[in-house]
Image (cartoon, coloured by chain):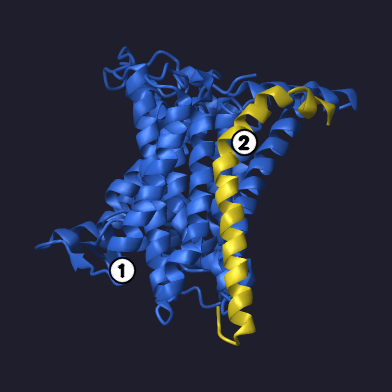
Chain colours: A yellow, B blue
Amino acid sequence: MTFVIAHAGHWLVTIAYFVPVLGFVAWLAATQLKARRRHRKSGDKP
Amino acid sequence: MTLPLAHGLSPRTDLPIPLTLFVYGAAVVLVVSFVALAVLWREPILERYRWRPLPGTVGRLLGSRGVDVICGVIGVALLGLTVYSGLAGQQTAASNFAPTFVYVIFWVGLVAASILFGDVFRSFNPWRAVGRAVAWAVLRGGGDGLPPSLEYPRRLGYWPAAVGLLAFTMLELASATPDDPSTVAIAALAYSVAVFIGMALYGVEPWMDRGEAFSVYFGLFAKLSPFETRERVVGVRPPLAGLTTVKSAAGLVALVAVMIGTVSFDGLSEQSLWVNVGGELGDLFDSLGMASETAFEAANAIGVLLLVGIVAGLYMLGVAGMKILDEEHSLRDLARSFAASLVPIALAYIAAHYLTLLAFQGQAMVYLASDPLGEGANLFGTAEVGINYFMGATLIALLQVGLVVTGHAAALAVAHDRALVMYDDDPGKAVPTQLWMLAVMVVFTICALLLLLAGNA
């Protein structure tokens, strides 16, 4: 797939647009997984 | 190779503000919409909508069997004209009725008609009309010896429709000769045979509801419409509310992914990224011994499948995120339950991408109606009418951005309403689970804007 890498200049810049969303998703996953673990420990439903 | 009919006539324009501001501005609009929904929309509105018949006899008249038959006859005549002009007319896309009718009026125009007037294709559907006419004739002829239709298998769900839709979009986007009139005519004939087999096996209405690609496709868009027909009476309902009646079944996620992914590829195929990558992929197939035209088609087919897969994958990631807090529903049930909320996004992509195609190329029907074969006829005296490019580049770009943002905001509202019903017994879950859908919608919005407008960056 050398041609994809050869054109990385095109799509690498585009990825920058998604950085804030990726950060949001990471935060969302971390907080919700933590909440689920906490509820499981306390024996409740999440 | 370019696909002149499959792509708008002026897809790239100069933006009045930088693309980055458009992209982040659209994302902010979605976040604000989400917060407003969470704060102000606390009870399901769409799921518990009221349907009211149109006043007087209007609703009964519009939904009557007579209107259904007339529309069916028109549909059959148009299918016949498409096949005849495609096979017998001039073999140039611009002067032949078939390509413009199929790719502009049928494929794009009927989406607009479905949104505005409800499920009009159900009445105009030529295959349904023929199927019903044959069934009626057989019954009148005392067709007792005919075997009964098979029961439509549950596991098939919407899969035949998804495959049919993918096949059509492959013709439009991957084929080297999508707008060749005879190709269009032969494809219409081949698809007709497939539909007749489906109807013969499972019955007319079951096949129309789940298996016939265009009935399902336009039917899904009609769910956004304020008009709905019940027991042969046309009535009104709140816009978007019809989406709550979409039957959850196998293949629904795939179907919606095909609807969004294929239009996305149409956008991507105009970008320098795909021109380079797709071109080199085609060269690779070429070097492996494929004919150059086949290599080009194979590269495009891979691109279409890739984007359909990416759309389905992103959606499933969002659903997997919802599953963190929801241990009651399976991943499959969650995916199917919220899949209908993606229909407004499919509409937004289609409206934004094909806006110019319908507005400009659609006018070609005025002269093609007078000269469907492209042989110099002037049946209605309109053969000399030209195309009026009445919208400027900046207005088109602004409309595209507006359509994309509105579509995604509508999708958020539908998903939010669905979540309120699903988590009726635990309302605290509705908003946190929908944060995942917000992330999915923002990603889809950014992708849509980049595919539509990146040429201006």
Q: Residue furthest bottom?
A: A43
Residue B212 drawn at (x, y percent): 53, 56
Residue B210 drawn at (x, y percent): 52, 63
Residue on which disc 2 sits: B171
Please report the residue visible at 69 percent of the width from the left and 42 percent of the height from the top. Answer: B306
Please report the residue visible at 56 percent of the width from the left and 19 percent of the height from the top. Answer: B91
Q: Residues within 10 Å of mark 1 (few under 14, many from 20)?
A: some
Q: Quadrant of residue B364?
A: top left
Q: Of B63 and B317, which appears nearest the observer?
A: B317
Residue B422 drawn at (x, y percent): 44, 74
Q: Of B21 and B202, which appears nearest the observer?
A: B21
Please report the residue visible at 53 percent of the width from the left and 20 percent of the height from the top. Answer: B455
Does dot 2 land on a helix, a strand or a loop? helix
Position above or below: B199 against B365: below
> What kind of residue is marked 2?
Leu
Examine the rendering and report whether any part of residue B46 can be seen.
yes
> What kind of residue is marked 1?
Arg
Residue B198 drawn at (x, y percent): 59, 60
In the picture, measured across the screen, residue B346 lies left or right of residue B250, that is: left
Marker disc for residue B42: 1
